[in-house]
Amino acid sequence: MGAIPLVCGGGFVVLLLAIVGAVIALYNRLIVLRNRVDNAWSQIDVQLRRRYDLIPNLVETVKGYAKHERETFEKVTQARNMAINAGTVAEQGAAENMLTGALKSLFAVAEAYPELKANTNFMQLQEELTGTESKIAYARQFYNDSVMSYNTGIQSFPANLLAGMFGFTAREYFEIELAEAREAPQVSF
């Protein structure tokens, strides 16, 4: 008779250890997903910084040919500054929408100057900006995929119980809100 309580007690310990192990594994999985989202955002930030660094050079190159287009240059500079200073994902998305529109205006100005279109510096800057735009698009996609995995992870049962206890909260997607900004910029020279 003494063996029955011991077996039941041993079974309870094994069950308790299994539950603790599952909680630890689930918590660690949520940490991995959260870190993946943070890393993905960092990758977007790297590409956006590169874009912001290219823009002043592009503006200065165009300025040399189109001195009377001051308003366009100011809009590009203002949009760039807003994007640099954005604090949240939503603010960043809105600022990027403005910057994309301002760059479209800048390229439209450049279109009117054939000698600018033939300028080697301008062509290199345009090529670098195009490459950076592709990298930004990929980084946005990776970020949004990571956010989807993370949000699904913290909203699924039983992880949602643990996520609530440890303060894991849903993240925002990095979205383009303006319909015209959803289209790829058309640059033809």
Image: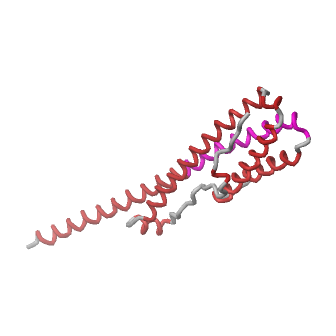
101 versus 91 height, above or below = above
Q: Is residue 98 left or right of residue 47?
A: right
| Picture coordinates of residue 159, whole percent (x, y) | 41, 64
180 versus 48 height, above or below = below
| Picture coordinates of residue 54, whole percent (x, y) | 74, 38
Which one is in front, 186 or 60? 186
| Picture coordinates of residue 102, whole percent (x, y) | 77, 48
Name the residue at the left extreme. Answer: 1
Q: Does the magenta run of residues contain 55?
A: yes
Quarter containing the N terminus: bottom left
Q: Is residue 189 visible?
A: yes
Write the start and end of the magenta stretch as one range.
38-67
Q: Is residue 84 visible?
A: no
Q: Residue at x 84, y 47 (%)?
A: 72
Q: Is residue 3 left or right of residue 140?
A: left
Quarter containing the C terminus: top right
Residue 23 found in image quarter: bottom left
Q: Residue at x 50, y 63 (%)?
A: 168
Q: Residue at x 84, y 45 (%)?
A: 73
| Picture coordinates of residue 133, whole percent (x, y) | 64, 41
